Image (cartoon, rainbow, N blue to C red):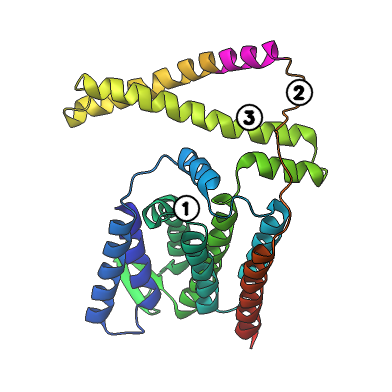
Amino acid sequence: MITGILTALALFSLLAGRIPFLPLALLSAAGGLVLALLSRHHSHGPVVIDQLAHRSALGQASTGWKALVCCLLLVMALNIRHPAAALLLGLMAAVFTILGAGVPLGEYLSLLSLPLSFLLLSGLALLWGYSTAPTGMLSVPFGGGFLTVAAEAQTRAALVTARSVGALSCLYLLALTTPLSRLVSLLRRLRMPEVLLQLMTLIYRYLFLLLELHRTMEDAAASRLGYAAFPQGVRTTGKVWGGLLFRSLHRTRQYFDAMESRCYDGRLEFLERPLPLRGRDLVWGLGLMLTGLALMVFSWR
């Protein structure tokens, strides 16, 4: 719902003054409603990402090749000079993630909704300014002055937001097709410091611990009618989050004791088998990179 409202407000602010008011209002409302409906699928964040990465149709593709393709697409997305080209690059990466890697559309949009909300908030901050006079493409009285949207702000916000959406889609292409263990193995071969790899792995796994504890405590509270009324729900939420801190610290100590009992010496090893670069992986990787390069060069003209 929040993503839909932000989308409608961002579309209205971006296109204000460029098309008539009634079509603009209908277009903004329709865009926000569509995105809100499509992103209603409930997901559990890191848990779903890890599951999708293990089930991905590209799971057996070379990790180094996938990382290279996604990093180059990310660089292209950040260097594109036209919003439409950046959105097309992001759409291409999203479509390939859904159709090529087999990620369900509902899961993809649900995972996209949270970072997209932050991007839209940033875009709105770039769009709106404060002035003592009603200037620009849109102005709203506020606090003795006016909140305004200038044409230059619309151009700048459109480019920054489009680049961010394109880059986000490229990152999702890598995250939803590559398990963490293979990313860690790749970074180890690239000589990343071992302490950073250990921190990255343990923090990622700790997210699963927190989510598991939170779901257990939330289900227990709901079974006792802890969310029957709004005031009661607020109190229950505070108790759940307060208890989550202590229980998670206790569970963490148990997990660390279990690791030490299995001779943990500061290095986590993963059993991996080599994934050679296949011909079909070379084809889709080159196709994505050439298409992204064409969009970037076209935007420079």
Q: Is residue 93 visible?
A: yes
- The span from disc 1 to disc 2 (Cα, nearest Å) is 33 Å
Task: Give the residue number, with chain letter if any, for mark 2.
Answer: 266
Foreground residue among 26 and 111: 111
Label for residue 115?
1
Frontmost residue, 283 versus 21: 283
Where is residue 187? Give x, y as percent.
Answer: 75, 44
Report the residue at 44% width, 30% height from top.
211
Residue 210: x %, y % from top left: 48, 27
Boundaries of the magenta span: 252-262
Taking the view exactly as shown, the residue that stands out farthest to the front is 279
View extreme (left): residue: 229
Q: Mark 3 or mark 1, which has the lower sequence index?
A: 1
Judge left or right: residue 46 versus residue 8: right
Q: Quadrant of residue 203?
A: top right
Question: Please, is residue 275 above or below residue 246 in the view?
Answer: below
Q: Please name the amino acid that badge 1 sits on.
A: Pro
